[in-house]
Amino acid sequence: MNTYKPLFFFAFVIIFFVIFYKVSHSPENDANKYYQQYFDRITTVKALPLKIVDPDYAIHITHYDTGFTLIGYKASSGSIYVFNFQDSISNKYFSLRLFDKNFQITNFVDESLVNTEITVYVNKDDLNNPAYGTKQNPIPVFSFKGVKEPVRVESNNPGSVNGYKTLEPTQAEYEHNVLLYLKYIMTKEEFKKRFEGGK
């Protein structure tokens, strides 16, 4: 039986290392704890996105790191579609982030939103904070809806209704966007200051 002791010890060391690495390198904020508090402060604002000439600023696909995984010892990640725009009504800058959204949908979002009056879903504290709304620090947007008509594209693909496919996030996608923004995008410094009494 003593021959198994080195194996058990080796397994224990590996498990300890993995847990320690996960805890010490986790990119996550404790979003589940404060999600409702942030979500309850979300309001709607009318916006009219202007076309931004600089494509490096306006649109890009990026990723969020979900941390250390046991399989392969690699960090897992998800995708984020980002559409930054200036609103011609308020002249403020906004940043729409759609987490884990199918590329076939996000491929049409920017061209459908430019010069289209929409309702955007933003946090009141972000909206009223003068540090937000600049080109360098746009106001996060978690969902949108068309004002005059739904934002949609012609499509006969599965999931289409009457020849159209909606581009507007569902309620579940909207909530998913908020949660993952708090968990992975908001900086740890800001998260601690806003929710945990840090300075």
Image (cartoon, rainbow, N blue to C red):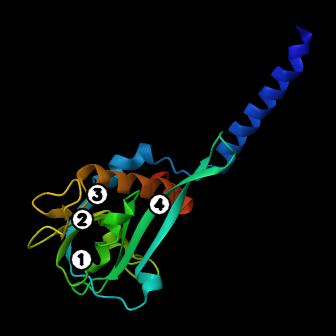
- For marks 1 and 3 on the same chain, the one whose residue lies earlier in the sequence: 3
What's the CA distance linking mark 2 and mark 1? 9 Å
In this rendering, does residue 141 appear at all?
no
Residue 120 image position (x, y, % from top left): 24, 69
Measured along the vertical axis of the image, is residue 126 above or below residue 15?
Answer: below
Q: Which mark is residue 167?
A: 2
Residue pointed to by mark 1: 112
1 or 3: mark nearer the eye: 1
> Residue drawn at (76%, 38%), measured in percent from left and top?
17
Q: Mark 4: which secondary structure? A: strand
**Discs 4, 2 touching: Cβ within 8 Å:** no
Q: Which residue is mark 3?
A: 41
Kind of residue sitting beneath label 2: Leu
Q: CA distance from mark 4 to mark 1?
A: 21 Å
SS state under label 3? loop
* Mark nearer the N terminus (4 vs 2): 4
Quadrant for the C terminus, please: bottom right
Mark earlier in primary sequence (2, 3): 3
Between residues 196 and 122, which one lies in front from this camera angle? 122
Residue 106 visible here: yes
103 lies left or right of 65:
left
Q: Residues within 10 Å of mark 1 (few under 14, many from 20)?
A: some
In this orientation, which residue lies closer to the viewer: 89 or 62?
A: 62
Q: Earlier in the sequence, mark 4 or mark 3?
A: 3
x 27%, y 52%: residue: 40
Of circles 4 and 3, the one toward us is: 4
